[in-house]
Image (tube, rainbow, N blue to C red):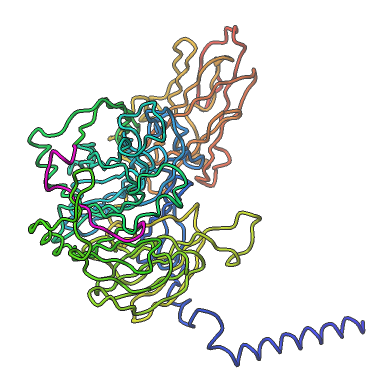
Amino acid sequence: MKNIFKSAVALLSVLVAFTSCNNTSQSNSGALSSSAAEKVYVAPGEHDEFYAFISGGFSGQLAVYGLPSGRLFKVIPVFSQDAEKAYGYNEETKPMLNTSFGFIPWDDAHHPDISQTNGELDGRYVYINGNNTPRIAKIDLTTFETTEIIEIPNSAGNHSSSYVTDNTEYVVAGTRFSIPIPQKDMPIKEYKGNFKGTLSFLKVNQEDGIMDLKFQVLMPGFDYDKAHPGRGKSHGWFFFTTYNTEEASTLLEVNASQNDKDFIAAVNWKKIEAYVNNGGGKKMATNYAHNIYDEHTHSATSTMKKEVLVVDPSEVPGAIYFLPTPKSPHGCDVDPTGEYIVGSGKLSANVTVHSFTKMLDAIENKKFAGDAYGIPILNFEDVLAGSVEQPGLGPLHTEFDNEGNAYTSFFISSEIVKWKLGTWEVLDRKPSYYSIGHLMIPGGNSRKPFGKYVVGMNKITKDRYLPTGPEVTQSAQLYDISGDKMELLLDFPTVGEPHYAAGIPADLIKPHSKKLYKLEDNKHPYAALSEADTKVVRDGKTVHIYMTTIRSHFSPDNIEGVRVGDKVYFHVTNLEQDYDVPHGVSIIGANTSELLIMPGQTETFVWEPKQVGVWPFYCTDFCSALHQEMQGYIRVSAANAKTPLKWSLGEDIE
Ligand code: CUA
């Protein structure tokens, strides 16, 4: 008893000491001011002000968060299979992951960009690149589903992608690695002068948003790292940072850091487009997949394309120039006016800013400092608008607010630095925890940023969260930028690597968000649009089940006459026409995922029964009070059995 009392007193005194300590040192109790919690608090039932689409990097996905709360709403599978949603598992979406290399259910998803009209976010689509097996995907922001993936031929490490022009005329993709084009067996040491990089321009059909690879520009064998379109006054141009202008193929950490300056490539795509529209360019044989999901058939188709139009810059004089930019520039960011092109040299002490006006002037006066493979190089001093002197270490990316300020992430010094466009003075700096890569201001890549918040995306979190073994969560950080000084408000964990993000006011998306698929619009070839249409059809060893769901049963729910060795297709139509009433379905031993079927939608999975027996299937999504009753049985007979094919609901199979 005595000991317990003593311990209690000791504990109390410790608590008192902590409390009094807190009382006297409130001002330095961490990075947060007392109002931070209030600023990110979204009350139960209330909605966030912004959507943030944060890429999952090596997860191949795109996650949807709310800002300022940092709450996760949905993970959209793009270049990945997702067992939760059956994407990449069901028969309808498998073709989305088709490529010239076959079915590739993974990629490295980096840079989301939201479609624009007149240089402002319009909230129709978000595009994102797959780096590894070069692809660009489109996500429809009425359904939040991946509805198109186009493979990029003649490309490797599709990194300077995917960015849209002012009116979403084009989605642009650039190659990181240069390669032999067309691919061939050749010695690696013959890289220099022989390997090439491509910049791909995907024309967007304004009616349905479908992309078409209109042309590729065949560039010198540099690494094309990041890109952004011109906007406003520079609309019609596109800018790409390059590194490895040394054209090294080994030990790049040394060999690609030799040149004092690499380049930003300025590409007049309108000029090249006009050239192509007049019959310019050469058709090159190639092979790439174009996969489109149709909302009416609820199914994707994959088409292999066999040729691509390639443009040699020497055929279009005046279309491409190189702007010398110090030390392996990474980020290539254009301010909302379109005047300033910011190139962040990873190894440079300063952030370099080029002037679009000065660039045009230098071009007009033919002030060239030479050429690289026939592409004119402008003089650094002639195009320089200014530089931010020694703002931090390891500058990467820059975003902009609507008041003429820029925000640059610094990887090595782990901070965000705010500076002024035009005067180049540093206004503020805040640490990031830790090693920030990209940062994002909603609309920060458009003519109309919404400069209320910046989201930092960090590569390392170390001690910021509860540990979860060797792999700890990655995270984003939210800063308030509405005042003169930035204020850190919130850390929030992210799914996968938060590589980059696109943010948009919720009001630009929310009113258009789809609630259900209308049954009368369902054109799926295996849909059963009522219980009367349900049936089971045998075709040799293939069995098609036309099944429906409605709270709280399947139709049919008893099936006999299936045999071991059959290939059984469950085509399940969800007859519900209410918002937020999906049903799921799965069966024992299915070598795939469950299905999660939205109201009015049809989805299919394949089951190959291996064993004789009577096997249950059930609804996997908690749909009603009688969800647990939503089940059925399939009788599987031996391969040579004569059990007749029968199905029923609400009565015994005779
Ligand atoms: Cu239908 Cu649970």
Q: Residue at x 57, y 67 (%)?
A: 464
- Residue nearest the viewer, comparing 536 with 437: 437
Name which quarter of the figure residue 296 lies in: top left
Side of 72 relative to 453 (left or right): right
The quarter of the picture where the N terminus appears is bottom right
Q: Is residue 200 magenta?
A: no
Name which quarter of the figure residue 358 lies in: bottom left
Report the magenta residues as a range: 312-330
- Residue nearest the viewer, comparing 61 with 65: 61
Q: Is residue 322 magenta?
A: yes
Residue 302 point in image, percent of width and height: 33, 28
Residue 217 point in image, percent of width and height: 22, 40
- Residue nearest the viewer, comparing 526 with 77: 77
Side of 453 relative to 569 (left or right): left
Residue 490 point in image, percent of width and height: 48, 70
- Residue nearest the viewer, comparing 140 with 568: 140
Q: Is residue 488 visible?
A: yes
